[in-house]
Image (spheres, rainbow, N blue to C red):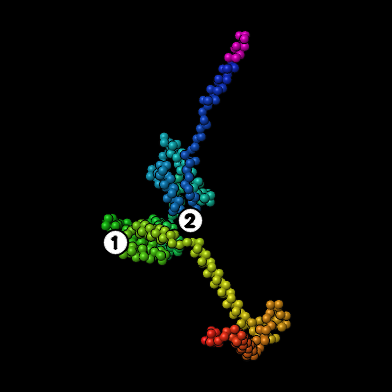
Amino acid sequence: MSKSDSEDVEIETSKRNHEISTTKSAPAPIIIQSESSTFNAGIILNETNYDMWSQIMEMHLAEKEKLSFVRGNTQPPTEKDDGYEKWYTDNQKVKRWLLMSMSPDIMKRYIRLKTARDIWKALSKAFYDGADELQVFTLNQRAFSSKQNGKSVSVYYGELVEIFSELDHRDKVIMECEKDVAAYHKSVQRQRVHIFLAGLDGEFEQIRGEILRKDPVPELEECYSMVRREFVRQTTMSGEFEKPEASAMVSRNKTNQNVFSQKQDRTRSNKSNLKCTHCNQSSHTRDRCFELVGYPEWWDHNRDQRKKHPDRNSAAAIVETKTDLEDAAGKSSALITTGGHPNEADDWLWY
């Protein structure tokens, strides 16, 4: 191998090693995800859900340590201050979170406001009902009229707790004495226990009585726990002693029998009201009279004679029966006479 060929081999080997080294050491692509892109409130503000939306947004903002931007705890710096750029960036970020959690129609109303605090205050004025008497009245009305109506205990209880939470949110009673606070809380709990128990279905009558006999009456959560255990017990017992398929079959058979019986009764009732103007017989009309449209093959013509002369038919039947009996007696006597017995007293027919 010449010197030039040796140099060419070294160059090719060096290039190949460099390519392999570059491939092995190439860093994986880095995906940069901004903080704002990961924010998802899980709820979109509309015309009816401001109370829930505002509470969820406060949780998210507190998690991001940006709650002060909507509460107004600190004054924003001026443009000449050193921290203005940082504040402006964070304010725009919070504004974007708020606006992207609204429906498009609501977003358009507030997108031009300068700060997140301005948006928050404007939303509160527009949507917050506060201690509005109409809202409190509606919530109390829903609570007192709530019924289980076949729903599971957990669903029924959850609906009531949602109403009670909204009432607590609007309750502006202020007390300073701890004893008064405890007495007020006890009174509210007692009323809510009564509401919960009153709306239960009839199968919980026994556990309801047991709870009301307790002194003091347990709080709402404990009452729910007791009723839930009773519900589980009833469900378990019914699952052990009931066979759904057999019960369903029995129920279907009874239903079918009742329907068939009702149809027969209706058919008899309807036919009894019919009368033929041709033959003066009941249970059919002129257009279905066999004397006019013809008798079917299965028709018993002797039945008409029996209907027209019931006395004659009865007498004939009696005569026929009497004749048959006389024939049978004659045959028996002949059998006795010719039976081959030497003494009539030996035959059992004489006794």
Q: Is residue 56 above or below residue 294?
A: above
Tell which tag, 2 or 1, sits nearer the viewer. 1
Residue in front for this viewpoint, 33 or 101: 33
Mark closer to the chain start, 2 or 1:
2
Residue 4 part of the magenta-drawn span: yes
Q: Is residue 86 above or below residue 14?
A: below
- Residue lying at 55% horizontally and 23% vertically, measured from the top left: 20
- Residue lying at 50% horizontally and 61% vertically, measured from the top left: 245
Amino acid marked by disc 2: Thr
Residue 349 spot, x, y in % from top left: 55, 85
Q: Is residue 114 visible?
A: no
Could you classify mark 2 by the number of other residues whose Cα lies within 10 Å: few (under 14), some (14-19), or many (20 or more)? few
Q: Which mark is residue 256?
A: none
Q: Is residue 34 visible?
A: yes
Q: Quadrant of the N terminus?
A: top right
Q: Which mark is residue 48?
A: 2
> According to the image, label 1 marks what residue?
216
**Range covered by the magenta-colored residues:** 1-10
Alpha carbons under labels 2 and 1: distance apart: 39 Å
Q: Quadrant of residue 13?
A: top right
- Given the current orientation, which residue lies at the most extreme top position? 2
Q: Quadrant of residue 212?
A: bottom left
